[in-house]
């Protein structure tokens, strides 16, 4: 699903100097830069020695492939047949070492970081993001689970301590923060032989292919711009489809410039003023399908289309690993 990108905000001054994040060696992906964005939008570099903390790379885990729960049926000739693979929530362990020149400086940094993570239990998830040297980035929504207790042994908790944080991820997949979009519109309505043989734009409604470069199914968001009287979306590879009929909610045909947005996860249909149009779907047969990895043959059909009619889709690729 599309992500709302938080603004980069400098973490509060807790007594140390400034400074950006430096690469940290992560056991499953090599050298990378890691940041955490808390629910308020503040971005915390996780390897920022100038600010008074850094990642203990040897303890980082949970960045690899998703764990699955397998459901199988016994096979009469021995063994079993896989019936279903269910992805499980992910747990990421991220150890941070926090320090200061004085106890007051240290405890200020410790408290600020603890609040940044624990507020996810009250205000919604934060985002852990891994940036590779080649410029690619992947992020995952996280909730604090445990670990900000400190080591509790002699010599710690005065001017330094280590927090081995466990972050719980309800969606185990990593997502690319850069969304992929596609635009299709009606071609020119010029008659084919008037005055010469003509063709429409290649970016027209009808049959097309949508590529998903990720590892797993994504659930796109669609925006339809009128005029249109009935909008039908069909995945030609699976045969699944859904249709939106503005007349079913008493609106009448979409006029030029009017828009309706369909989200496939969670399933919602909203008119441009925010009103709920879920009743416009062709229930009970509607299937708000997703896009499998690779190429997906799809068809967009807009009845009553005209100049300005268009379909836009947007999604963020999802991946098994960071």
Image: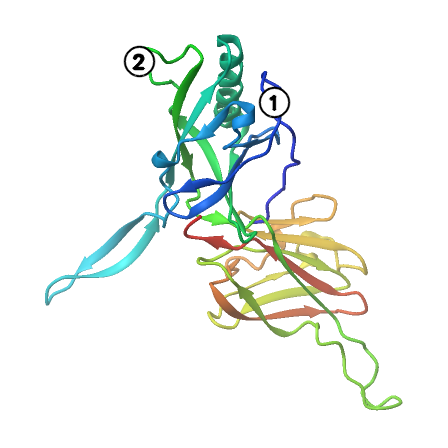
Above or below residue 132? Residue 285 is: below
Q: Residue at x 50, y 40 (%)?
A: 23
**Labelled disc at residue 120:** none
Q: Position of residue 18 (x, y in %)?
A: 62, 26
**Element type where label 2 sits in the image:** loop
Q: Residue at x 77, y 63 (%)?
A: 227
Callouts 1 and 2 close, C-beta under 8 Å: no
Left or right, 161 with reference to 246: left
Q: Read off the residue under disc 1.
A: 17
Above or below residue 251? Residue 211 is: below
Q: Where is residue 83 in the image (x, y as percent from the top left)?
A: 27, 59
Q: Position of residue 248 (x, y in %)?
A: 66, 56
What count of labels does the image hold? 2
Q: What colour scheme has been applied to the protein in the rendered image?
A: rainbow
Q: Residue at x 34, y 18 (%)?
A: 151
**Labelled disc at residue 153:** 2
């Amino acid at each position: 699903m599309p992500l709302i990108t938080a603004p980069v905000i400098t973490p509060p001054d807790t007594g140390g100097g400034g400074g950006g994040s430096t690469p940290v060696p992560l056991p499953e992906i090599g050298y990378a830069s890691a940041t955490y964005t808390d629910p308020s939008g503040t971005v915390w570099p996780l390897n920022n020695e100038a600010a008074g903390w850094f990642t203990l790379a040897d303890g980082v885990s949970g960045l690899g492939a998703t764990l699955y729960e397998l459901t199988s049926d016994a096979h009469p000739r021995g063994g079993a047949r896989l019936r279903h693979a269910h992805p499980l929530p992910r747990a990421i362990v991220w150890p941070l070492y926090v320090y200061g020149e004085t106890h007051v400086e240290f405890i200020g940094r410790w408290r600020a970081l603890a609040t940044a993570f624990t507020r996810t239990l009250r205000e919604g998830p934060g985002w852990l993001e891994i940036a590779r040297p080649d410029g690619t980035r992947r992020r995952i929504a996280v909730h604090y689970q445990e670990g900000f207790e400190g080591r509790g042994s002699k010599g710690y908790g005065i001017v330094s301590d280590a927090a081995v944080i466990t972050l719980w991820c309800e969606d185990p997949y990593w997502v690319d923060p850069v969304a992929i979009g596609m635009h299709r519109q009606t071609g020119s309505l010029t008659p084919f032989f008037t005055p010469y043989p003509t063709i429409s734009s290649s970016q027209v409604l009808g049959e097309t292919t949508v590529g998903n470069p990720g590892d797993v199914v994504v659930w796109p968001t669609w925006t339809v711009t009128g005029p249109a009287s009935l909008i039908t979306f069909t995945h030609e590879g699976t045969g699944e489809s859904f249709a939106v009929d503005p007349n079913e909610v008493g609106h009448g045909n979409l006029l030029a410039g009017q828009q309706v947005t369909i989200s496939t996860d969670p399933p919602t249909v909203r008119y441009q003023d925010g009103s709920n149009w879920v009743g416009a779907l062709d229930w009970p047969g509607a299937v708000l399908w997703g896009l499998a990895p690779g190429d997906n043959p799809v068809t967009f059909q807009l009845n009553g289309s005209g100049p300005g009619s268009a379909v836009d889709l947007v999604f963020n690729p999802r991946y098994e690993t960071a």
